[in-house]
Amino acid sequence: MASEARQRKLADRIKVIVAETLEKRIKDPRLGFVTITDVRVTPDLREGSVFYTVYGDEEAQIGTATALESAKGVLRSEVGKQTGIKFTPTLAFYPDAVPDNARHVEELLRQAAEADAAVHAQASHARFAGEADPYRHPQDEQEPSEEQADE
C-alpha cells in the first residue's frame, strides 16, 4: 500500500497527463470541450478514477464519454510513459456530478430567497396582536376600580 501523499502526487500527475494528452494528441471529433476535474487513485496504485465535465448538451456529453472510452488505451500508455511507475493504473472515466449539484444548490437558494421575500412582504403590513406596549406599568393616580369603589 502506498502512502496517502504518494497517492495524491500520482493522482495530480495523472490529471495533468490526461488533460494534456486530450488537448494535444486525441483528435476524436466526438470529444467535446472536456475538463478533467479530479483523479483518484486506489491505495495500491492499480486503478485510477478520472472525473470530467463536458460543456454542452446531452449529445455532447454522450459523445465525449464514448470518445474517452475509446481513447482509454492511448491515455493509459501515456500515463505509463510519463510517470515511470512499475504498474500503470487502469483508468476509468466518470462524469463529474459537481456542476449538477451546484445547479441544484443554486435553485434551492433561489427558492429560499423567494420565500424570504414573501415572508418579508407579509411582515411589512403586519400589526402586533396585543397592545402596542405589552408591559405592565405601575398604576399612578388612576381612578379606583369597581371593587375599591364598593368599599
Image (spheres, grey):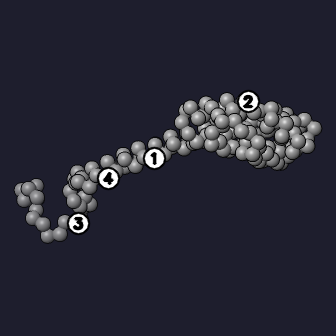
As drawn, 57 above or below 132: above
Element under disc 3: loop
Residue at which label 4 appears: 120
Mark toward the viewer: 2 or 1:
2
Mark toward the viewer: 3 or 1:
1
Mark toward the viewer: 4 or 3:
4
Label pair 4/3, CB-CB below 8 angstroms: no
Element under disc 2: helix
* Residue 70 tag number: 2
* Residue 138 tag number: 3
Give amino acid for label 2: Ser
User: Which of the marked residues, 4 or 2, is nearer the chain's N terminus?
Assistant: 2
User: Which of the marked residues, 1 or 4, is nearer the chain's N terminus?
Assistant: 1
Could you tell me how many numbered marks the image carries? 4
User: Which of the marked residues, 3 or 1, is nearer the chain's N terminus?
Assistant: 1
Label pair 1/4, CB-CB below 8 angstroms: no
Give amino acid for label 3: Pro
Residue visible at 20% across and 56% down? 131
Label pair 4/2, CB-CB below 8 angstroms: no
